[in-house]
Each structure stands twice: as structure tokens, then as C-alpha cells.
Amino acid sequence: MEKSRECLLNILTFTLIYALSGLVFADFAVAAEAAVHSHGAHNIGTELPVWTAVPFVGILLSIALCPLLIPHFWHNHFGKISAFWALLFAVPFLFTYHNIALHHILHIYLIDYIPFIILLWGLFTIAGGIVVSGSLKGTPAVNTVMLLIGTILASCVGTTGAAMVMIRPVLRANRDRLKKTHIVCFFIFLVANIGGSLTPLGDPPLFLGFLHNVPFFWVTTNLLPHMLTASAILLVMFFIVDTFYYRREKDHVESGPEEEKTPLKIEGVVNFVFLLGVIGLVLMSGYWKPGHLSVVGVHLEYQSIVRDFGIITMGVLSLVVTSRRLREANDFSWFPIAEVAKLFAGIFMTIIPALAILKAGNDGALSGLVLAVKESYHYFWVTGILSSFLDNAPTYLTFFNLALGKLGITEAMVPGALAAKAVTANPEFIMYLKAISVGAVFMGANTYIGNAPNFMVKSIAEESGVTMPSFFGYMIKYSIPILAPVFLIITFIFF
């Protein structure tokens, strides 16, 4: 009860800070907004050298190496380490660019980080009140079916929603298995990433495309072959790998105490109403355009504010109406979301120069890379690799705009250019956008930070006793050897 009160107090405090952020920075408002207007053409991405991304590399290396080298210190102080790297960039950035730097920092936190954490918190909280119980044994067939269900669900409720709903039943079904790491890694591949490629609700890059005039169902009809191919290959691979491990440990699994068979049951179903509420709020923010307000020179859309406060409301209602017993049955704790919030607070700060340089295109320090992107498979691999380490939403938008500029297409022309049978259809742009979309969504599975739910799934699995590989261990043992061949097949078939 005390923890619940503390959580609600934190939520209310966070909400108040979000609502009054303009007042908090009131002393800077006039100067910052004036700086933005007077330097409208000022693009810091054209000035920043590549080495300004060193703090970003530093925080990635900390996430990768500290849990291995100094695990106890990391577990107790990862928030301070994240803050150190953030300040290492922020202080000289503010000193050099003053109000323009303040504008960039506030922009990434108000527009990107806070909504990102609110959505994650809401889905994490709501899904934590849904309990799937019963005699569910983690056999290869059962595990494959659960991954298939999660993959399909991801395009309906988003990769984060599907991951938060499905990860605990998967872990519970496999509690007696000795080898479980591969199950969680394939779960990240399919449920937390590739499964979200069929609707703009599935993954943030696709929703961003929807906001920039890509028709809602264009994604469904055009990315379905890519999604089915990748999912089918990975599900077959998973079944083979899981069968191999299951046969080796079958005696151990079957030698455990015989449990009384109970029917499959879903409790906390009221949380599905809150989950639908979150989906509705996200959709609303894509269609409703009432205008914006300016906070320290940052334009906050009214629909985004309504969406974020609505999601917080859905999460609070879930906490209030869901029985404490159900959350205890799920081994629910706030540590995974706290870990993600603290680490990504640092990541979003240190990612500013990398994104600015990338957005500068031909005029930035990575102009050679941008100029090299010409063919559809270039868009697929470059968008994908960058999305593995950077925020995949702005990476998607960068190459989306690059393709528009290359072909002389404006945003208003996008629906016509994507209408396959229309006179205005542009086959080259259609192919580019397929490559950009698939790369941004699929290759988010390459690292723990490639997509929002990856790190949270890892944290929940570790809390349940699953030994997860390190940042580089995940890449070397799982994502590169398993996903790279799949992406090569996708390249040769489609791009």
C-alpha cells in the first residue's frame, strides 16, 4: 500500500511538472523563442563535429560493459552514470549555443522523451494488471504459438503493448525450463519489433509516417509480405532451437512436482478497456489537429497533451481498480520502468548531436553517408543500422524526407505518390518508403536500445530470474547471427 501511494505521488508530481513546464522555464521563454526565430535558418547539425556524439557512445558503452565489470555499482548507481554522460554533453552545449541549445534540449524532452516515457509507463502499468494463469507448459509448440500471438498482437496494440501483455505469460509458462534466454531474445525480435510493422499503431516510425500523410492502410498492404517472410523464418528457427534445448532438458522439466491441471484463465480483463483507451488516444492524436501552444519556443500540440494526460489517467485508473493480488501474481515492480526512464533520459540528451548531424544531410559531418544512400537496399540497411542505435522515429523521418527531396515530392503529394494505380503514383518512392519502413521497424531488434520495449523486456526477464546477455553479448550471440541472414534474405527478395 505504501509503495502504491508513493507511486501515485510520483505520478502526480510528474504530471504537475509536465503541465507547468512552461512556467518552470518562464525566465528563459522570451530569450529562447527569440533565438529560435532569429536563427530560423541556423542548423547546428551543419556545425557539430562527429566527436560531439562521444557522450552518446559513452552511455552505450556504460550500458554494455558496466553490468559485466562493476555489476553491484551499476545496479545501485546506473541513474547517476546516465546523468553524468548527459551533463557531459549538456553543459558545453549550453555554454556554446546558449538559448538555441536550451531550445534543442527542451524540444527533445517535451516532444520526444516525456511522451515516450508516458506511453511506456501507461502500457507497463496496464499490462501489469493482466494475469494469464492456468496449466501452460513451455513446450516448443506452446512457445511458438505464444510468440505468434504476440507478433500478431503487436500491430494491433503496438510493440510495447504486446510485449508488456505477453512477456509475463511467456516467462510463467517457461519457469521450469533451464534454458530460457533464447526465448526472450526471439520474443524481442518478433513481438517487440517485427510484429509491429503492419499498422501505424505498431511502431513509432510508422506512426510518424502516418502523421506525414502516409495512408493508414498503405503500411498494412505494402509491408505484409516483408513481415510474413521475416516472421515465418524466425518462428521456424525458434521452433528448431527451442526443440533442441527442450529435448536436452526434458527429463529435468518432467521430473518436477506434478501440478494440478487448471484451465487457462485471464484475470484483470478490465485492463483491456484501459489498453483500448490508450490505443484510442494514440489514434486521436493522429487525426485531431486543434492547434498548438508554445512552451519556451517549443510547439506542443494540443492533441499530444490530451493524449499524454489521457494515458496517465488510464494508468492511474488501472492502479486503482486492479486488485493488488493480480499485480503480485505478475511479480509486478516499478524497477523496470524506473531503469528505462533513467537510462533513456541520458540517451535522449546525448543523442541530440547525432540526430542533428544526420538531419543536416549533405551539409553535416555525415554527408558522405547520406550521399551514399541511392538505391532502395541502401535505404533499408542505412535506416536500419542507424535505427539500431539511434531513435528509430527521427531516423525514419530523416530518410523519408531525403527520399522526398530526391524525387521532388512534397508531403501533400505523398498519398498520390503511394497510390499504386493512380496516375500520380511514383514507383521509386514506393520502393524507397518500403525500404525505410522495414529497416526502421525490423532492425530495431538489433540492440537493446533499438526499440522502446526491448530494454524493458530484458529488465522484466532479469527480474524473473532469466540470465540475459550483455548489450554486446545480445548482438554477438543472438541478433547478428540470427537476424543478419534474415535481413539479407529480405534484401534479395524485396529490395
Image: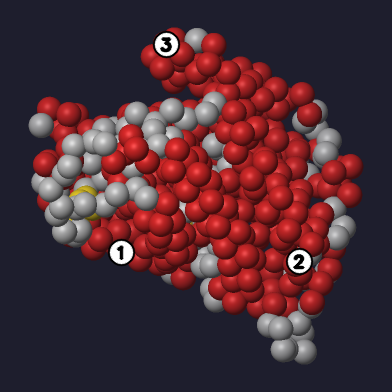
Label 1, secondary structure: give it.
Answer: helix
Q: Residue 124 in the image: x percent, y percent?
A: 33, 45
Q: Which residue is mark 1?
A: 276
Looking at the image, which residue is at 73% across and 78% down?
Answer: 417
Q: Quadrant of the C terminus?
A: bottom right
Q: Nearer the viewer, mark 1 or mark 3?
A: 3
Kindly identify the amino acid type of the residue bearing the numbered disc 1. Leu
Q: Whole-Å distance between the Cαs marked 1 and 3?
A: 39 Å
Is residue 217 or residue 189 the one in the foreground? 189
Q: Which residue is mark 2?
A: 493
Q: Which residue is mark 3?
A: 72
Q: Residue 58 in the image: x percent, y percent?
A: 63, 20
Kindly identify the amino acid type of the residue bearing the numbered disc 2. Ile
Residue 354's quadrant in the figure? Answer: top right
Mark 3 Cα-neighbour bin, 10 Å: few <14, some 14–19, many ≥20: few
Mark yes or no: residue 375 visible.
yes
